[in-house]
Image: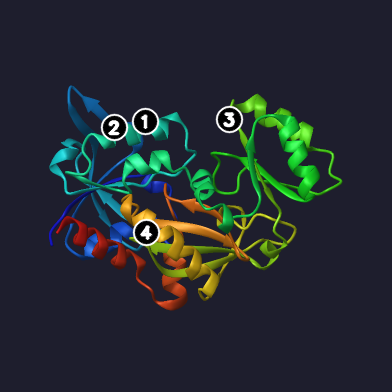
Amino acid sequence: MTLKVAIQMDPIENIDINGDTSFRIAEEAQARGYELFYYTPDRLAFEEGVVTANGWPLTVRREVGNHFTLGEMQKINLADWDVVWLRQDPPFDMGYITTTHILDRIHPDTLVVNDPFWVRNFPEKLLVLNFPDLTPPTTIARDLETLRAFKEKHGDIILKPLYGNGGAGVFKLGRDDKNLSSLHELFCGINNEPLIAQKFLPAVSAGDKRVILVDGEPVGAINRVPAKGEVRSNMHVGGRPEPVELTDRDREICARIGPLLKEKGQIFVGIDVIGDYLTEINLTSPTGIQELERFDGTNTAALIWDAIERRLA
């Protein structure tokens, strides 16, 4: 199958080609002979009924410091393309949400991956609420007294921004920690969003597992081990990726959530599992496929494109 593929992502000049998932997706597409076009989210527009993007024809190569070539800038009508990738990183703010509204205008005639309607309506820290028996005790609130009551009940907790990413703003508060009020004041001074609190899972010291699903099916996992002195395992903040096998519990979790993800057009998803608990379902810009490929040879990018081709067929 020959496809025209547009990739909406953060600036390509800044990526780490040995870890960036969008690069690996583009690399696999190019190997299949697909035509690639790249643009950043600020160059997406709705113009009198037409969804356009100002960007560049793209060629990628696995050479550090020389990993891409852009053609001449041009404006395209995204409705003329087969696939559009929604791949910019969070934060999941109104700018991000607006791009999903605009891309709704062309989907599904042009296949947007992942389906922007459900990316918008399934924020990663909120979709897990559909599966309370799979998740640790959780509270979402802006009210300080509600958060205090949760901490009093569960002792050690994790407090984080509801729409944050990459481990930014994640705090562990012990039972005797007196900083809840100060952190609440800090977060409330930044925005008017609620906070999310979860019972702390000591199993995180052994790692936070990223399980990758393609069209609702698990294809593999990596373990992200926190750096010394950290409770955050995100690779953005020094977490160390390690090979890991899927457990029976991981497969049980995937069997529960997979059919919903497939039904809602979430072709490429990364979930976070600590011990026996599901903590996040990442739809916006999942990562980890290059690490998985290095560890066990699983070409997740190929599996993703196979799934896309099946949908288009």
Query: In this figure, what is the number of numbered marks?
Result: 4
Give, as a three-letter code, the residue at label 1.
Thr
Please name the residue that numbered disc 4 is placed on. Answer: 259
Q: In this view, does 137 lie to the left or right of 242?
A: right
Compute the Cα span from label 2 to label 3: 23 Å
- Check whether the beta carbons of the residues at disc 2 and disc 3 lie within 8 A of each other: no
Q: In the figure, residue 97 lies in which quadrant?
A: top left
Q: Quadrant of the N terminus?
A: bottom left
Please name the residue that numbered disc 3 is placed on. Answer: 193
Compute the Cα span from label 4 to label 1: 27 Å
Give, as a three-letter code, the residue at label 3.
Glu
Q: Which of marks 1 and 3 is in front?
A: 3
Please name the residue that numbered disc 1 is placed on. Answer: 98
Q: What element carries label 4?
A: helix
* Residue positioned 37% across, 59% down in the render: 259
Q: Is residue 275 left or right of residue 220?
A: right
- Check whether the beta carbons of the residues at disc 4 and disc 3 lie within 8 A of each other: no
On the image, the x and y values in percent for residue 53 come to: 24, 35
Give, as a three-letter code, the residue at label 2.
Ile
On the image, the x and y values in percent for residue 198 come to: 67, 48
Give, as a three-letter code, the residue at label 4.
Pro
The relative height of residue 287 versus residue 276 in the rendered view (above or below) is above
